[in-house]
Image (tube, rainbow, N blue to C red):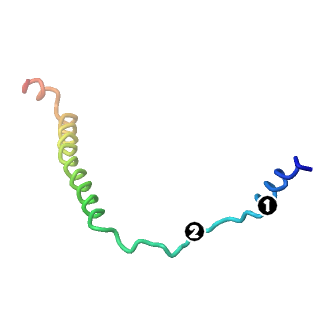
């Protein structure tokens, strides 16, 4: 009988367990100034990386569209 007591108590505990639901009313009102500053800093970094990328693409397109003879004369 003593061997069944721990098993019975575990089964009783697990069987009576119910699911817990989170409260849905806890929402943040608005992002703070630090969030906006971080997003602005990230936007400046992305915009700064667009300038060299655009220059690289324009240079590659010019190289693809140029005639081979013109490239030999410049070198």
Identify the disc placed on residue 3.
none
The image shows residue 62, relative to residue 40, as above or below, that is above
Q: Nearer the viewer, mark 1 or mark 2?
A: 1
* Residue on which the image places disc 2: 22
Q: Position of residue 19 (x, y in %)?
A: 68, 65
Mark 2: secondary structure: loop
Left or right of 21, for residue 42: left
| In this rendering, position of residue 57 left or right of residue 8 | left
- From the viewer's perspective, is 48 left or right of 12? left
Q: Residues within 10 Å of mark 2 (few under 14, many from 20)?
A: few
Judging depth in this view, the residue of 9 and 72 nearest the camera is 9
Earlier-in-chain disc, 1 versus 2:
1
Percent coordinates x, y for residue 45 in the rendering: 22, 51
**Distance between the alpha carbons at the discs numbered 1 and 2:** 21 Å
Name the element at disc 1: helix
Name which residue lies at 48% across and 73% down.
26
Quadrant showing the C terminus: top left
Q: Which mark is residue 15?
A: 1
Q: Residue 5: where, in percent of width, then height?
A: 85, 52
Quadrant location of residue 34?
bottom left
Residues packed near mark 1 inside 10 Å, few (<14), some (14 to 19) or many (20 plus) = few
Q: How many marks?
A: 2
- 21 or 8, which is in the foreground? 8
Q: Where 68 sits versus 21, above or below? A: above
Q: Residue furthest right?
A: 1
Residue 16 appears in which quarter of the rendering? bottom right
Rendered residue at 20%/39% (across/down):
56
């Amino acid at each position: 009988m003593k061997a069944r007591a721990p098993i019975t108590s575990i089964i009783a505990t697990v069987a009576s367990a119910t699911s817990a639901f989170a409260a849905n009313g806890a929402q943040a009102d608005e992002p703070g100034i630090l969030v906006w500053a971080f997003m602005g800093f990230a936007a400046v970094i992305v915009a700064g990386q667009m300038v060299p990328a655009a220059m690289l693409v324009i240079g590659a397109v010019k190289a693809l569209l140029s005639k081979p003879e013109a490239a030999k004369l410049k070198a």
